[in-house]
Amino acid sequence: MSIESVKAFVATHAPIYTSAIHGIAHWDRVWEFGQSIGWAEDADLEVVQYFAYLHDCQRWDDGKDLEHGPRAARFTREVRELIDLSADQFHLLVRAISGHTFAMPGSRAGEDPTLATCWDADRLDIGRVGIHVDPKYLFTDMAKELCTLGNS
C-alpha cells in the first residue's frame, strides 16, 4: 500500500481529521517541514512522511491530550498492512509516533536523524496555536535554522 492509501484510511478513522489545529492541514505542514529538515539531516523520508500523517491521528480533541502519541502508535500497529515500510522502518515510525508527545532535546532519541526530523517537523508548526517556536526545544541544526528564518 502507499501513503495515499494510508491518508485515505486515516481520513475516515481520525476523530481530529478536519481540525484546523491538529488535522490534515497540520499534517501537510509537518510533511513539508519534514522534507526540508530530512534532506539536510539524512533522515528516512519515507518514515517521516508516514509520521506526518499518523502522529496526531488518534487525538480525541484539540485540548491537552497527552496520550495521543501512544494511542496513535497502537493505531499504526493495527493498520500495519497499509504501511509500505520495512520492519526496521516500521519500528522507527512507531517509536517516532509514540514518543513525539514527550520528546525533549538532550534525550538520546534525538540522536537518530529520522526521529529528530519527525519531532522537529511537528514542533516547527506550533505557531498555529500562538506559541513561539523556541530553538532550544529543537533537535536538528536545520530546524533551528528554519526557526531562526521564520522568526526574523
Image (spheres, rainbow, N blue to C red):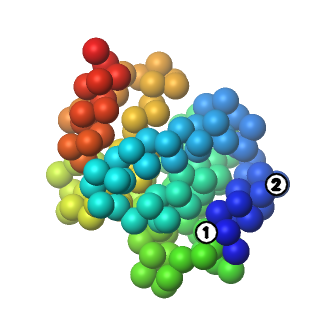
Residue at 75% from the left image edge and 37% from the top image edge: 18
Query: Quick one: label 1 or label 2, which is nearer the N terminus?
Result: 2
Residue drawn 77% across and 52% down? 11
SS assignment at label 2: helix
- In the rendered image, the residue lying farthest to the left is 106
Indicate the position of residue 17 as horizontal and vertical percent values: 72, 44
In percent of width and height, residue 80 lies at 64, 77
Residue 97 shows in the view: no
Q: Nearer the viewer, residue 133 or 117?
A: 117
Tell me the amino acid under the disc marked 1.
Thr
Which residue carries the number 1 mark?
A: 76
Q: Residues within 10 Å of mark 1 (few under 14, many from 20)?
A: many
Answer whether residue 14 is visible to the viewer in this image.
Answer: yes
Residue 24: % across, % down: 67, 42
Q: Quadrant of the N terminus?
A: bottom right
For label 2, the residue is 12
Q: Secondary structure at mark 1?
A: helix
Q: Quadrant for residue 72, please give it.
A: bottom right
Residue in view at x 61 percent, y 68 percent: 76
User: Above or below — where is 120 with respect to 135?
Assistant: below
Q: State the residue lying farthest toward the top.
A: 152
Q: Label 2: how many residues lie within 10 Å, few (<14), some (14-19) or many (20+)?
A: few
CB atoms at circles 1 and 2 under 8 Å apart? Answer: no
Relative depth, front residue between 101 and 88: 88
Q: Which mark is residue 94?
A: none
Disc 2 residue type (three-letter):
Thr
Classify residue 114 by image quadrant: bottom left
Q: Quadrant of the C terminus?
A: top left
